[in-house]
Amino acid sequence: MNASAQENRMELFAPGHRACHGCGMALSVRHILKATGNQVAVVTPTGCLETFSSPYGYSPWRVPWIHHLFENGPSVASGVAAALDAQGRGDVRVVAIGGDGSTFDIGFAALSGMFERDDDVLYICVDNGAYMNTGGQRSGATPTYASTTTDPVGKLRPGKLQHKKDLPAIVAAHGAAYVATASVAYRKDLQKKVKRAMEFHGARYLQIDTPCPSVWGFPSDHTLEVGRLGVASGLVPLFEMEYGNVTKVRKIKPITVDKYLRGQKRFRHLFADEQGAELVAKLQQMADANIAKYGLSSQSGGQ
Amino acid sequence: MGAVKVVEGSQAVAEAVRACRPQVISAYPISPQTHIVETLAQMVADGELGSRYLRVESEFSAASVLAGASCAGSRCYTASSSQGLLLMTEVLYASAGMRLPFVITGVNRSISAPITIQVDQQDTISLRDTGLIQLYAESSQEAYDMHLAAFKIAEDPGIMLPVMVCMDGWILTHSYERIDFLDQQDVDRFLPPFKPANLMEVEDPKTWGSYSEENVLMEFRYALQKSMDYAQERIPQVMGDLASYTGRDYGGLIEAYATDDAEVILVAMGSVTGTLKDAVDQMREAGRKVGLIKIRCFRPFPARQIWEAVRGAKVVAVLDANVSLGSEGALGLDLKAKLCGRPDGPLVVDFIAGLGGREINPLVAEDIVDQALEAAQAPTPPWAPIWVGLDASIVA
């Protein structure tokens, strides 16, 4: 067995945790830790990951793991990194893994502070686009026109009206050495990005699209398929940035956005009437803009 | 003995913190604590202090950095005041719950609104239930000594809790006072490096901050309470140990001043107790049997020690530089609750005094004693606290 295969057999995020069937987040964490190896300490702010992985007395974490609060994952991670450095144990690297609620919203100030200070932490957002832990409420990461329990479809509103916060760009604007997006649907790409991130020191950011069958509303054996469709549609662009410049993108053969949206209950209202069709057209424009902006299309001439 | 210098209270605290060799410091500016963290930053900039110093974007993050650093096994420190301490509240609850020891200087300042930078103890008192051990200093010398003790108390294997040393803003932090410093080698002998029982190691990975259900949370809280009980015994021992180096013994959890035959006993915390000692002396000279209890440790609350000191008195007058709106001051509430039902105990009267920097001088103290005696002669105890020195033209 070669070294890489051996490494891949090491389960640092063990089975037996309490995630929902088909959880994209749990799968991502497993992939992440296979890429980092065991010389890491992980900090997780409050959210799904903390809840399903830490019922008192049980732990799937085979690396040191700390949960403290919802809005301070980045600051706690900074503290761990500072302490390890002060103790001459800088060989143990710090990885924070938080959901989009803590990362995009309540912990945003702490995240910005950590990136401004350039503390030696790889911050990974496992993004499922809403507050799943509390039943699927709207977050700053919720995509446009998705229906959530606090911004539901009604007679007057088609779900979320605003854009998803462009957090990778915001983080990159802090001068971060490495910023990337990945999808749980593309394991090798995800792990390559984690490894690349670990080659840098200072604050780094990785945002992973992690479909959530329970709240997005699709069968729990379709997680990877939904993830792949999101990437292929252009709504979930996968790219890498170093020092603020896009260095690499994952090329796609673009599909129309309806192929991604149709399979999810959170977008079901977009296919109910003519008004919905107009909104789908707007989402198509967003996808097209992403495809143009990042040069995602592998087809000659692009979109 | 170490050096003797006249320094600002903030500098005395910074020197104490430096001598304790924290590995991580994290801070955010707020008056009146700022001179402390500025002095520490200068020490780091000049290479006199080897701490990792994280200049964070909020007090919430300052405390959170300490939580992470403490969890990873480092001694660490921050200071804050007023709104900054309130912003830390959630972090302090969780840190105490996770048994993360670190030291905070709580430089006392009132809470908005109205916004003010003047002193009272509403800020630190608001953190009463977090699981923080709270010590209150009368002087900058005492604050210096308390900081040396605080790290040892926090890191005691039977305690493992954050400790906050409270000192009145401006009155102590910005006044110059003669300070006897302890030699570094004595500090090192008194305070060995922090060695947590649960080290963060990749070879033996542990999980911190688990999710609990109805089966364990009460037991966690009970363990915290038992540690507070143990701290009641341990804090005087640590302070006694320190006194063997410094030659300065302030008493244990409380200092009883002229209480033996006192009819009226004042109870207070912080710098006002220096003024009250003078007031007691003056009243004693005038033949009045007045004493004072200075509370040095508010959490854990030294009810037994206070009871022993006040049981022979006629009336206890509590000076609360805080108020639990809709009820009364925190110190008064604690004392009444703990003394309630004990036979032949004194009447406890609560005075709301010194909010937002309102002056308390010996004349005010004498007035409080008079009002306490008056209350003791009334047929029933007062239901409401007595507000001291209100401007009648404003409240009319």
Image (cartoon, coloured by chain):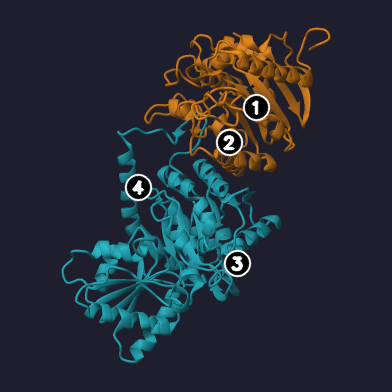
Q: Residue at x 35, y 68 (%)?
A: B254
SS at mark 4?
Answer: helix
Q: Identify the chain drawn in orange.
A: A
Colour in which the image shows chain B: cyan
Q: Residue at x 48, y 12 (%)?
A: A220
Q: Residue at x 55, y 40 (%)?
A: A76
Task: Report how far apart the C-alphas of labels 2 and 1 lie in the structure.
Answer: 16 Å
Task: Report how far apart the C-alphas of labels 3 and 4 lie in the structure.
Answer: 33 Å
Given this view, does label 2 or label 1 mark the residue nearer the observer?
2
Task: Report how far apart the C-alphas of labels 3 and 2 lie in the structure.
Answer: 38 Å
- Residue B333: x and y in percent read 31, 63
In the image: residue A163, left or right of residue B345 = right
Identify the amino acid type marked 3: Gln
How busy is the neighbourhood of tag 3: few (under 14 within 10 Å), some, or many (20 plus)? many
Sequence-first tag of 2 and 1: 2
Which mark is on residue A206? 1
Q: Among all residues in the image, which is located at the extreme right?
A: A301
In the image: residue B342, left or right of residue B107 = left
Q: Which residue is mark 3?
A: B11
Q: Which residue is mark 4?
A: B224
How busy is the neighbourhood of tag 4: few (under 14 within 10 Å), some, or many (20 plus)? many
Q: Which residue is mark 2?
A: A105
